[in-house]
Image: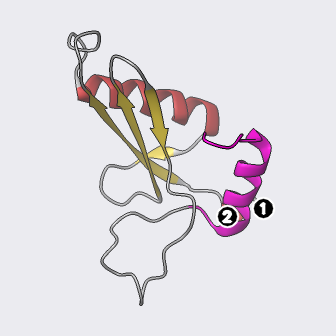
């Protein structure tokens, strides 16, 4: 349901290698942040975010990382990043039809 979706997010960019040397990590984060905000309607919030989108770019791969499961507040308080609710994570994983090894 719509209530389970994040309302705010933070994008973090990381880069390595020769091909991405001309890009800045902040520039990658800005680009991703704008794209996610435009497509999902979520607000960017660098400090009080519901979800963090981390993009790793290197000479071989572009990897987008999303925490898929919510982390409990009492038992796992040492984790700083919240994730998606379990039903939303399941629906996302099911819709992409991942193959073994992906």
**What residue is drawn where x is 32% and y is 49%?**
46
**What residue is drawn where x is 24% and y is 24%?**
16
Q: Judging from the image, what secondary structure is the residue with disc 1 in?
A: loop
**What residue is drawn where x is 55% and y is 55%?**
7
Q: Which residues are magenta?
A: 84-102
Q: Locate residue 55, reporting x and y percent.
A: 40, 35
Residue 73 location, quadrant:
bottom left
Q: Quadrant of the C terminus?
A: top right
Q: Locate residue 1, reporting x and y percent.
A: 78, 61
Using a 10 Å C-alpha cutoff, classify the residue at mark 2 as few (fewer than 14 neighbours), some (14 to 19) or many (20 or more): few
Query: Mark 1 and mark 2: span between their CA atoms?
Result: 6 Å
Q: Are marks 1 and 2 in contact (CB under 8 Å)?
A: yes
25 is within the stretch colored magenta: no
The residue indicated by pointer 2 is 4
Q: Locate residue 79, reporting x and y percent.
A: 34, 71
On the picture, is 7 further left or further right than 30?
A: right
**What residue is drawn where x is 53% and y is 35%?**
37
Residue 1 disc label: 1
Q: Nearer the viewer, residue 85 or 56?
A: 56
Which residue is farthest front? 101
Q: Judging from the image, what secondary structure is the residue with disc 2 in?
A: helix
């Amino acid at each position: 349901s719509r209530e389970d979706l994040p309302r705010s997010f933070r994008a973090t960019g990381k880069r390595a290698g020769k091909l991405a040397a001309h890009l800045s990590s902040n520039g990658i984060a800005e680009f991703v942040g704008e794209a996610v905000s435009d497509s999902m309607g979520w607000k960017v919030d660098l400090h009080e975010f519901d979800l963090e989108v981390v993009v790793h770019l290197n000479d071989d791969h572009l990897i987008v990382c999303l925490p898929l499961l919510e982390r409990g507040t009492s038992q796992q308080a040492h984790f700083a990043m919240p994730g998606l609710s379990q039903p939303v994570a399941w629906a996302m994983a099911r819709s992409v039809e991942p193959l073994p090894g992906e």
